[in-house]
Image (cartoon, helix red, strand yellow):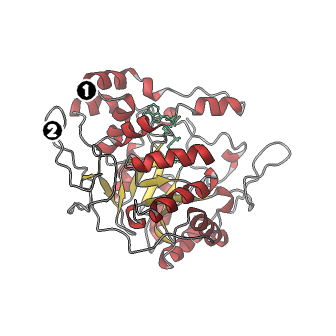
Amino acid sequence: MGCHFSCKTSCGPPSLEAVALNGQPSKEKAANGTSTPRVSLSNQKSVSPTPTSSLCNQKAVMEYVSLSHGSGRMPMVGLGTWTAKDEEMEAALEMALQNGYRHIDTATDYHNEKVIGKVLERWIKDGKVKREELFITTKLPVYGNRASDVEKWLKRSIDYLRCEYIDLYLIHVPFGFAKADSVTFDADGKVALDNETDHVAMWKELEKQVEAGKAKAIGVSNFNKKQIKKLLAVAKIPPANLQIENHIYLQQSDLVQFCHANKISVTAYSPLGNPSLQGFFSKLGITKEIPNVLDCPEVVEISKRINRSPAQILLRYNIQRGIAVIPKSINSERQKQNIELFDFKLTDEDIQALRSLDRGEDGRIVRFEFFKGVYDHPEFPFKEA
Ligand SMILES: NC(=O)c1ccc[n+]([C@@H]2O[C@H](COP(=O)([O-])OP(=O)(O)OC[C@H]3O[C@@H](n4cnc5c(N)ncnc54)[C@H](OP(=O)(O)O)[C@@H]3O)[C@@H](O)[C@H]2O)c1
């Protein structure tokens, strides 16, 4: 199984405090004189900051959302890793750790857990970071969406990531595909579905993994409100997190409020509207116009006025809504922008302007159309646009 990280107890109590990435509580003020903002979510406690150590980026600070179980908190900014593979991923993660990232978002189905594990192990062995300073999220693959497969896939992720536990283990999607080692297709190019997907049975198995210490916290991704309610009705350990697409064109305020009211933290994926997806869809022959969220005129106007990049405006908007963000970048300068979010604040007027840009379901970018036939699954979660 290879050499694993030292596994100590995980870090401190629930916190929403800003912590300077050089290990000091933030005293920074924005150019306009506002203090570093605190995120206040209903049902979330604020306690003293826990210093992080041995970080290189002196400028950025970090805030945390509370988790209802596990280590009790999650950095509000993490590194997204979808589509980044092997050498590209290795270099990107090396840069990200230097730039102060400690929260990494991956998944079995991104096929990059091995290289991520290699880099993390190197940093720990070199004494540049401690395991308990890292927050690693990974996800059960769609072709493992059944109770009897949970343990196997979680164990494989732990092996690949070379850690003894996962900080947050998510069911990646609510629908399920045929049992296999990857997505399988029929002769018509349709995915082989498993229509028997049983969320409650899977959840019980995830709870066992928490009890066994293999996952500190468990949650779901791409689930709708009805699906989450069903879990809440039976869970001994309620979901700590929901990961969903979230940006100005798809704000999902009702779902976010529901989660926060039920002590479920929310993480935004594709928080920049993933501009690279246009090419990804075209390569697959899917005709779909992806809105360029980064070019949105209202975002660009605020960006110029307060001298921050459009990406920072988009990310900061979600942070002020109490939503964690996991922007993906393989570029060091863009990574720095994407984590430097805690020394400025959007005004109420800016927040209002950005809120009005919501397009509801029309704004959804990731509808899983690259899995032909997936809409036939009984647990497909999204309403028609
Ligand atoms: N749970 C799920 O089903 C699910 C689905 C999708 C994504 N995710 C997770 O969420 C993460 C983020 O979502 P995503 O990768 O879809 O999209 P994203 O983070 O919204 O966008 C990534 C794209 O934006 C570019 N970019 C990054 N920072 C930028 C900046 N400051 N200015 C301009 N462009 C910038 C990146 O290019 P460079 O790399 O060249 O900088 C990349 O092409 C994923 O990587 C993955 O970890 C989860």
List the residue tagged with mark 2.
34
37 above or below 166? above
Q: Nearer the viewer, residue 130 or 191?
A: 130
Q: Going 52% across and 56% down the picture, which residue do you hit?
A: 119
Q: Amino acid at mark 2?
A: Thr
Residue 171 visible: no
For the question of whether residue 298 can be seen, the reply is yes
Residue at figure coordinates x 31%, y 59% from the top left: 53
Q: Position of residue 373 (x, y in %)?
A: 72, 44
Residue 344: assigned label: none
Q: Quadrant of residue 290?
A: top right
Q: Classify the position of the C terminus by image quarter.
A: top right
The answer to whether residue 155 is above or below residue 265 is below
Task: State the CA–CA distance, disc 2 to disc 1.
Answer: 13 Å
In terms of secondary structure, where does tag 1 sit? helix
Q: Amino acid at mark 1?
A: Ile
Mark 1 highlights which residue?
Answer: 306
Q: Nearer the viewer, residue 118 or 326?
A: 118
